[in-house]
Image (cartoon, rainbow, N blue to C red):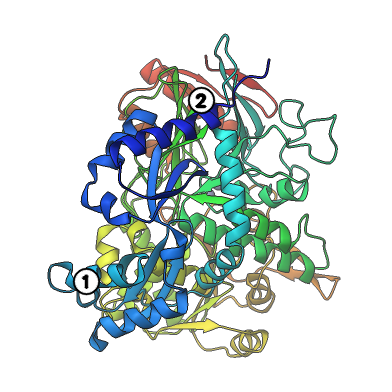
Amino acid sequence: MAMPAEWEDLLKQTREIVEKLAPDAVITEIDFEGPLIVIYTKSIEKFAENPEIVRKLALSIRRRVSVRPDPSLLLPEEEAIEEIKKIVPEDAGIKHIYFEHDTGEVVIEADAPGKVIGKEGMLLNEIKRRIKWAPRVVRAPPIPSRIVQQVREFLKNVKDERRQFLRELGRKLNRPPMQGENWVRVTALGGYREVGRSAHLLQTRNSRILVDCGMGMSGENVTPYVNVPELWDYSDSARPFKYLDAVVLTHAHLDHCGFIPVLYKYNYEGPVYATAPTRDLAAMLLLDMIRVSYSEGGDAPFESKHVKEFLKRTITLSYGETTSITPDVRLTFHNAGHILGSAVAHFHIGDGLYNVVFTGDIKYEHTWLFSAAVNRFPRVEAVVMESTYGGRDDYQPSRKEAAETLKNVVRTTVERRGRVLIPVFAVGRSQEVMIVLENAMKRGEVPEVPIYLDGMIWEATAIHAAYPEFLNKELRELIFHRNENPFLSEIFQRVGSGEDRQKIIETPDPAVILATSGMMNGGPVIEYLKNMADDPKSTLVFVGYQAEGTLGRRIQSGVREITLYEKGMPITIKMEMEIVTIDGFSGHSDRRQLIQYISSMQPRPERVIVSHGEERKCLDLAYAINRRYGIETVAPRCLETVRLR
Ligand code: ZN
Ligand code: ZN
C-alpha cells in the first residue's frame, strides 16, 4: 500500500488549477525548482496581462509560483545581447549583460538605467517582446569584482546540473510529512561557550537543518561535532549526511562557513541557503583558505571542487523573502548589520507551532556600512544569539569616538615618521576603516599618506559595490557618485603581488597598511609584522575581535616576544612597535547592544539560548538577560541539546 507521493499530487493539482484559470494558455511543463513551482508556457503574455492568475494559483496551492516562457521561445544568449544593443541607445552605457538561468531573467548593467528602460518602460517592453527573457535593469557597479564574475560564469556552466538538483530538491521538500507528536530541539555542535566553529542543529520530527557550519580559529577545537548520531548516519559511510535536509548560512566568515565544503566532501547532496553576497564572499574566503593552507605547507580539509559543489547547490534569498526549506519549516533572512550579506535567520516551524531566530553575528547599531540588525518579527518564541562582547565589562565606545582615536593614532605615527599596521578581516571592518581614513585625509584631519590594501581587501570591497542593495542608504548613494565614492580614492593602493609587498616593506616612508588576516593567524600581515615589529616609531592597531589562542590575542594581551616562521624555521621577534587596541569598530554588538537587541525585540521572546562567546561571556549575558527581563536563558555547552517544544 504505497502512499501517493505528495509532490505528484501537488503537480497534478497545479496543472488542473492553471488549466481552469488560463484555459487557452499553452503549458509546456510544470515542475519544481527548489522551493518554487515553475510553469513553462508558450503563452507568457496571457500570464503577464493577468497577474491575478499567479496570485490565485499560489494561494490555492500554498507554494511560491514562477511563470516563465518556454525555453524554445527564448532567443539564444548571443543573439539576445545583440538585440538589446540594437534597441538601447549608446549613451545608456551598458557595461554588462548576463543571464540568470535560475529565473529566466536577463540582467542589464548600465551607467544610466533610465535610458535602458526608456520612456514609460517603452524600450524595456520592446526588449522583452523581442528576446522573451525577462529583462532586469541595474546600475553598473563602479568597481568590477572578479569573484562575482567567476561565480556567475561557473553557475552558467553548470546550469543543467543545477536545474536537475533543484527538481530533485523540490520533490524532497514536498514529501509527505510524518504524522504524530510535534517537537523542536536545538543541538549545540560548535561555537558554544567558545568563539569559532559555529554549528547548530535545528531538528523537528520532519526536519534536520544545520544552521552555520564553521571552522575553529586555532588550537584543538577546529572542527564542529558533525558526527553526532542526530546528524551522521553511521550505517552509511558513503553518505553520512543523507538525512540532512538543508544548511542555512548566516554569513561568510569562516567560523560560520569554513566546514561546509567538508559536508560536500562526504557527499552531502542538499542545498545551502544564503544571501547572494554571502555566497560570493564565502566562495572567496574558502578558496583563499585552501591557498593559505598550501602556502604554509599544511593541508586544507577540502579542495576547490568541494567549494564548487557548495556554489552549485546554494539557493540565494533576499532579506524578507520567505521560503519553505523542509516540509515543516519556512525560512526568512533579515539584515544582521555585521558584514555584507549577513543575516538573522527566522524559522517558522509547523504552521504556527513554533518560531525560532538565530542571530548569527549581529551589529545592533547603524554603522558606516549597514543598517542595524533587524529584531522585529511576526512571531518569535526563542532566540539563539551570539555573545562575543556579552561580558560584564564589554562596553565599547561609539563609532564616532573610535574614529577619533584611529585618526589620532595615525596622525601621531605619521608625524614621528612611522607606519601604521592594521590587521583586518578582508570582509568586515576593512571597508569601514577605509571610509574613515579616506574621509579624514580628504578633510585634512590627518596627513595624506598612501593606504596599502593587502590580501583580498580590494576584491572584498568590489563585492560590496556589486551588491549596493545590502548597504545602508547613505553609502549606497555615495558609491554611485564617481567623485564621492570613497573606495575609488587615489590614496588606496592595492598590493597585487609578493614583489609589491616586498617593495612596501623595504620603503620606510609613513604609510597605513591594512592586511589580512584579522587575528594574525597567518596571511600577509605576518610579513609586515616581521619587518616592522622592532620599529618603535610604528604602530600596530587592533580594530577587530582577537580570538583566544591567536597570535593577535597574545600580542594584544601583552606578550612582547613572539615566535614566527621564516621558510619553515622558527625566528624570535621582539615587539617594540607601539600597540593600540581601538574598540568601537567591531562588527559585533557590545554588551549594551546585545541586551537592547533582546529587550526591544518585538515580540519579546520567551527563551534565549546564548552561544558564540567565551565561556564567561556566555554565562554573563545569559545571567543579565534573565535577571533584567525574566526571560528564560541558557548557555549550553557543545553537544548539549535544548528542547524548545
Ligand atoms: Zn562574523
Ligand atoms: Zn562569528
> Disc 1 to disc 2, how far (Cα)?
41 Å
Query: Is disc 1 placed on a helix, strand or loop?
Result: helix
At horizontal 25% and vertical 73% (from top left) the residue drawn is 113
Residue 480 image offset from top left, x and y in percent: 28, 73
In the picture, measured across the screen, residue 123 lies left or right of residue 182, that is: left
Q: Quadrant of residue 600?
A: top left
Which type of secondary structure does the marked residue at label 2 adopt?
A: loop
- Measuring from the top left, give residue 79's x and y in whole percent: 42, 80
Residue displayed at 18% across by 68% down: 121
Give the answer, above or below, for where 514 lies relative to 624. below
User: Is any part of residue 616 visible from this angle?
Assistant: yes
Residue beneath label 1, please? 117
Callout in the foreground (1, 2): 1
Instruction: Determine which residue is flagged by label 2.
Output: 328
Residue name at image x 42 percent, y 84 percent = 449
Nearer to us in this view, 603 or 118: 118
State yes or no: discs 1 and 2 in contact (Cβ < 8 Å).
no
Q: Is residue 18 left or right of residue 278?
A: left
- First in sequence, mark 1 or 2: give its number: 1
Q: Which mark is residue 77?
A: none
